[in-house]
Amino acid sequence: MNESSNPDIGFGSSTGNDPFQAAKASAMKAAEELRAAATQKASELRTAAETKAQQFKTAAEQRAAELKSDLTEKAGEFRHYADDAMGQARETLGEARERCENLLSDAEELARVKPRQALLTAFGVGLVVGLILRR
């Protein structure tokens, strides 16, 4: 038997009707089509991912701007509250200082007018404070 007369015999024959060559060409074509489809899908996914990333970035920037605005507003409110509290504290301190000065001048006047009573009062207050601190 001759190899050229029977194409199904032997793997090394190179005839135009070789089924392995046709299958190989078909597989190569299918692989190329799959590669092209994969490249196309990768491009589409990349574009979709970039679009989503841009949307997330825009949303994040908008939310950050809103938060900044809210925080700036709250900071202004706290600053206003702190200024009011500081003003009230200064006013209260001024009133307390004035009362202390009045009490001091009254005590000095009492010490000039009634020195014995002022001395006994100071002694009594000192004694009571000493007993309280001793406990």
Image (tube, rainbow, N blue to C red):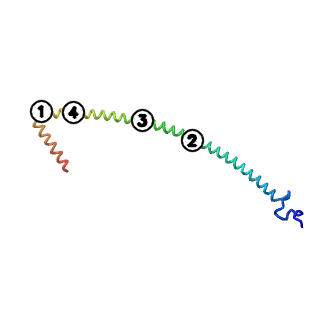
Task: Tell whether 7 sits left or right of 75.
Answer: right
* Image coords of residue 12 (percent x, y): 82, 62
Task: Tell whether 36 sits left or right of 92.
Answer: right
Nearest to N terminus: mark 2 or mark 3: 2
> Hey, what amino acid is under mark 2?
Lys
Q: CA distance from mark 1 to mark 3?
A: 52 Å
Q: Which mark is residue 77?
A: 3
Q: Quadrant of residue 76?
A: top left
> Hey, what amino acid is under mark 4?
Glu
Q: Which mark is residue 101?
A: 4
**Which residue bears the numbered disc 1?**
112
Nearest to N terminus: mark 2 or mark 1: 2
* Image coords of residue 63 (percent x, y): 53, 40
Residue 99, placed above or below residue 26: above
Q: CA distance from mark 4 to mark 1?
A: 17 Å
Disc 1 packing (10 Å; few <14; some 14–19; many ≥20): few
Residue nearer the viewer, 69 or 42 = 42
- Mark 4 and mark 1 in contact? Answer it, CB < 8 Å: no
Q: CA distance from mark 2 to mark 1?
A: 80 Å
Label 2 or label 4, whichever lies nearer to me, is 2
Nearest to N terminus: mark 4 or mark 1: 4
Secondary element at tag 1: helix
* Image coords of residue 97 (percent x, y): 25, 34
Secondary element at tag 4: helix
**Which residue bears the numbered disc 2?**
57
> Hey, what amino acid is under mark 1?
Arg
> Hey, what amino acid is under mark 3?
Glu
- Mark 4 and mark 3 in contact? Answer it, CB < 8 Å: no
Secondary element at tag 2: helix
Q: Residue at x 74, y 53 (%)?
A: 31
